[in-house]
Amino acid sequence: MPPRRRFRDPIHHHRVFHLTESRVAIAGHPVHAMLVAFPIALGFSTLAADALYWWSGDDFWLRAGLWAAGGSFVMGILAGLTGLAELLLVAGIRIRAASWTHSILAVMLLGLLGVNWGLRLQGGDILPWGALLSALSAALIGMTGWHGGKLVFDYGLGGHEAHGAAPSRTDKS
């Protein structure tokens, strides 16, 4: 019986596949990776503030949700701009489908975060629409983060080129 053929990523042999070193970095540390934690944490904090407001009725949680939603949106814009710069400047990132999926989901997420913050800036009660937007944002944060994690952990993107890219899970050779 002939040996089983292993699946290889079709772009693996492309000349720019391994050119994945971050171009937007401070002392070798990718800025996008440093910034992205803030909108993630603040997005989930907005959902938590909504849940606590719904449970307690305390206006403190309205204010906390307003600040968390605003911080999530503003930091998301900053993280998105650095991610966009990486996407456009680094050919090894640009060539991967997961990069484009991650960026499209991130743009959708920024739209949700912006609408959620805008709703809160108008004042008044955020139930049920603000809480629903927070829940949708949290779900989209999970999907966006999963694709971003795939780029880091499966492909080794954003690190130093000298260390080499991590082998893809699809590359079993």
Image: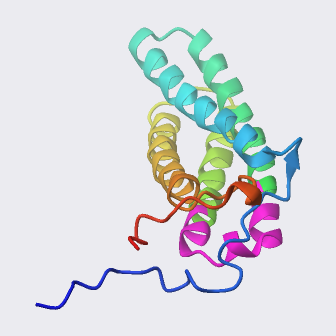
For this rendering, which residue is in front, 150 or 134? 150
**Which residue occupies 88% across, 42% down?**
26
Tell me if residue 93 is in the magenta stretch: yes
In the image, taking residue 107 as reference, residue 3 lies left or right, namely left
- Residue 73 lies, in percent from the top left, at 71, 42
Of all residues, the one furthest to the right in this rendering is: 27
**Which residue occupies 48% across, 17% down?**
53
| Residues rendered magenta in the picture | 83-102
Quarter of the image where one finds residue 1 = bottom left
- Residue 88 lies, in percent from the top left, at 80, 71
For this rendering, which residue is in front, 148 or 109? 148
**Which residue occupies 65% across, 60% down?**
107
Work out whether 108 lies above or below 79: below
- Residue 109 lies, in percent from the top left, at 59, 53
For this rendering, which residue is in front, 92 or 120? 92
Per the picture, the main secondary structure of the magenta-coloured stretch is helix
Q: Is residue 161 visible?
A: yes
**Which residue occupies 59% across, 74% down?**
96
Of all residues, the one furthest to the bottom in this rendering is: 2
Quarter of the image where one finds residue 71 = top right
In the image, taking residue 16 as reference, residue 31 lies left or right, namely right
Colouring chosen for the image of the structure: rainbow
Work out whether 153 lies above or below 126: below
Work out whether 101 lies above or below 110: below
Q: Quadrant of the C terminus?
A: bottom left
